[in-house]
Amino acid sequence: MNLLLLSNSSSDAGYLTHALPWVQEWAGQHDASGDALFIPFAGVTRTWDEYETLVANALAPLLTVRSVHRMDAPVTAVRKARHILVGGGNTFALLGEMRRTGLLAAIRERVQSGEASYMGWSAGSNVACPTICTTNDMPIIDPQGFDALGFVPFQINAHYTDAHPAGHRGETREQRLREYTLKQPGMRVIGLPEGTGLQVQGTQYRLLGDAGARHFLGSEAPRWLPAGPLAMA
Amino acid sequence: MNLLLLSNSSSDAGYLTHALPWVQEWAGQHDASGDALFIPFAGVTRTWDEYETLVANALAPLLTVRSVHRMDAPVTAVRKARHILVGGGNTFALLGEMRRTGLLAAIRERVQSGEASYMGWSAGSNVACPTICTTNDMPIIDPQGFDALGFVPFQINAHYTDAHPAGHRGETREQRLREYTLKQPGMRVIGLPEGTGLQVQGTQYRLLGDAGARHFLGSEAPRWLPAGPLAMA
């Protein structure tokens, strides 16, 4: 498999701008036409048309992007795609629509076979995991099951941060993830701070960006993983 | 129905301390023994025994608290209870366990009949709503359906805040709730800031605390509701 899983899309530099060198390396793994199929289902407050335009413009130097929502045969489009892009937004909306349309199974098969590369950011990285149990998003719809694509053998927490608004009595992110690791003691969680990502090429994992990532497992104390090659036993 | 739905449990004054006058008025609606049945299932990082002790000590001036997890016949205990307390923690863990044990249906019936009063805080307020779709919590388990107790005809967002850590690229609370109201345009959301609560006595609603509450509906601009009587058409 060839995966690029980003924490986030936007920075002061612009939409996906910080990720363009990584996208270039990811897209270059397939010597294909440069066409990419975009899955916009996580978009709720922007329309899918608007979302397609945003992503197409951002990646225009590297790829020709078309959104699956305008196609007559979405599953067939997935089965022909060489590059699949899954955008951020609401993870529950994304997973529910992927399941409803049959794209969940089609994308899983196409990417696991190695015939398509997969790039996701935020919600698109969450659904690459075994489940969506470590999303930060609000559960605005029931996705009819929390199981997702399962491309990596651990959970990702996107937009990872320790910051907490002053005076706020809700749980910190670390407390939320600790609830998860207590319920699922055998499953690792990789917290990806803003501006970071994970590159997966076959069995090789690499943390992209400068900040490293936060590692959670069972009742172990959380710890920072350095940027660069990542050993995932 | 007689409900007391709080945004949060703890303040600088201590656990549930800020709410004691409200709890006193709530408990006084039933001229009963002063026994209260506690539902600890939202607790994940603290044990249910620890959670029972915490709540029993906090409410000792007003009520004698026993947790349902130590009882041989939990459903029967609900059917005899006059005061039911549902504590905060993780909303998904709470709802899943309430459903699995049959307490969800038993509590719904007992409270809707008026035979028991219901008090919840944080996750305990979320499950009093039609669904848990406006919880802030991490979906650490699949609760096998998002439908909840439905004691109020709107959704509550507990720990409501507009604050946002500097440099964070994730969604604000208002953006998250806007995603919900776009998907469910007919359902109101009441955002309860820290230190606030909602009192429901029959058809009378009252916002407790000084901060008021934030109102969301469809594509309407969010607005503040003042503390005091609340008209819910």
Image: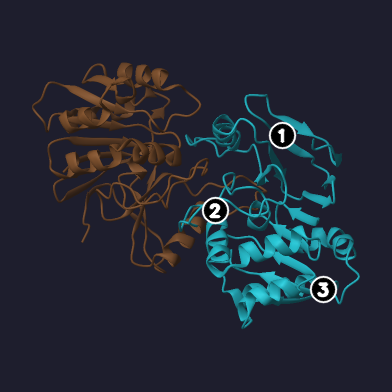
Chain colours: A brown, B cyan
For label 2, count other residues whose C-alpha is less than 10 Å away and answer few (under 14), some (14-19) or many (20+): some
Residue A188 sits in quarter: bottom left
Q: CA distance from mark 1 to mark 2?
A: 25 Å
- For the residues labelled 2 and 3, say whether their Cβ atoms are less than 8 Å apart: no
Q: Amino acid at mark 3?
A: Leu
Q: CA distance from mark 2 to mark 3?
A: 31 Å
Q: Amino acid at mark 1?
A: His
Which residue is tagged 1?
B215
Residue A125 percent coordinates (x, y): 33, 41
Residue A43 percent coordinates (x, y): 44, 29
The answer to whether any part of residue A159 appears in the image is yes
Label 1 chain ID: B
Give whichever of A228, A108 is nearer the camera: A108
Label 2 chain ID: A
Which residue is tagged 3?
B63
In front: label 1 or label 2: 1
Give whichever of A11, A125 is nearer the camera: A125
- For the residues labelled 1 and 3, say whether their Cβ atoms are less than 8 Å apart: no
User: Which element carries disc 2, helix, strand or loop?
Assistant: loop
- For the residues labelled 1 and 2, say whether their Cβ atoms are less than 8 Å apart: no
- Disc on the earlier residue, 1 or 3: 3
Residue A230 percent coordinates (x, y): 23, 52
Q: Residue furthest left?
A: A31
Which residue is tagged 2?
A172
Label 3 chain ID: B
Q: Is residue B208 above or below residue A57?
A: below
